[in-house]
Amino acid sequence: MPGHLKKILDFVAKESILKKTSLARMSLLVGEDVSRVTEETPDDPAREEKYIGAAQKILGLEMWDLTL
Amino acid sequence: MKRLLELFKVTWPGFLVALLLALFANFVHLSTRLANFFIDPLYLAFILGLWVRWTLGEKFILWPGFALTQDLFIPIGIILYGTQVHWENLSTSTLQPFLIPLVLALILYYVILVTPAKKLKISKEGSLLIWASCGLLGPLAVVLLASTLEASDEDISFSMILAFFVTTIMLILSPMLQAHFPVDPLTLGTLSTLSLPFLSPFNPITQGVPGAIAAAGLLFGLKVAMLAPVAFGIYLGHRFRKGHSGGFPLFLILTFFAVSILFSFVPSLSFARDNYEPVTKFILTLALTGVGLSTNLRTLFADRMKAVFFYFVLALIASVTVYFTGLLTLHFLHTN
């Protein structure tokens, strides 16, 4: 089922005070324009791992407990 | 502290670019004759931002700084703009001639620009921004409503580009229309503010006609005063539609409103109002530079080419319709 990457991005935006800055940092960390990710973007475990790592760094999270 | 330092490290390159562009836009505005036309530093900075982003392409290293410019300076700019609202000048007797034409214009803009949005695959948020941009106050309305609606950079930029396009075309059309349908200064001022969303009351149409500048100034003041109530209404609608909405937009609207009331009715503050104007303008210029720098024009035009074309036509139809409706309404009101 697609949508995992979008779910990660929505989580980052929801948990951030500076939403646009956090999403731009996601683009910088994962090396791609995350604004192109939609609900229909297919799931990809390798990309998900990269996205989760970047999200953890931006949000300062030790643990990742968002269920995808 | 560590996270703040980390934030600084990733945002300073982009922020520096945005700051330099905003300063350059102000410099160009002050040192050339652009001020004599209607090219505001706000819009110049936005266009420069769009161009730099287009030229640079995907330089991810700069993006966090571009985004931070928006995240920080849009809210600060909105709150500071509250200092420029003149509630004390608005009285029922002075505003009476403008109320009906303004309400009619807003309804017409809504019907023509918001109703077909779904068919043209433009989001509700995007169409409301277009409505605010063309019908209310160009970039100022967009900045306030974009925060309320949590709109995308592409939606913000598209609505600004449309309002600028309409203003430019109407600036050319208005003198031709006036040649065929001569109007008195009050009507001229009202029509210029209703159909030229990007212009201040002092513009090439009203230039040299004191009565028109005065009328345009009053209507402009009314539009500025309407920003907070309109934003609040749209916030409620957005919350109702989406089922949730952050508390920050509401905080922003209420603070903008509170500042506008304080600076209108507390004498010591209203005396100091003029000191805030250059700062407010520069902060808003910086915020719009950030919007321009964060907008990917390739995405904007590639994803919705059909909608972009139709919206250019619709916005123009809306403006011409508003012009003639305003003309007829004012003629009817004067003769009765």
Image (cartoon, rainbow, N blue to C red):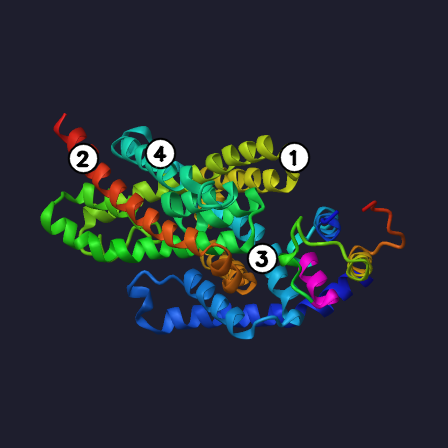
Q: Residues within 10 Å of mark 4 (few under 14, many from 20)?
A: some
User: With respect to residue B196, does B234 lie above or below?
Assistant: above
Q: Which residue is mark 4?
A: B107
Please state the total of marks drawn on the protein image.
4
Q: Amino acid at mark 2?
A: Leu
Mark 4 and mark 2 on one chain: yes
Is residue B1 visible in the rendered image? The answer is no
The kind of secondary structure the magenta stretch mainly shows is helix
N-terminal label among 3 and 2: 3
Q: CA distance from mark 4 to mark 1?
A: 27 Å
- Magenta range is A22-31
Q: Nearer the viewer, mark 1 or mark 3?
A: 1
Discs 1, 3 touching: Cβ within 8 Å: no
Q: Which residue is mark 3?
A: B70
* Chain of the residue on which disc 2 is drawn: B
Label 4 element class: helix
Question: Is B253 included in the stretch rendered in magenta?
Answer: no
As measured in the structure, the alpha-carbon distance from the residue carrying label 1 to the one carrying label 3 is 23 Å
For this view, does B112 lie left or right of residue B2?
Answer: left
In three-dimensional space, the C-alpha distance between marks 4 and 2, rounded to whole angstroms, equals: 16 Å
- As displayed, is residue B94 above or below residue A6? above
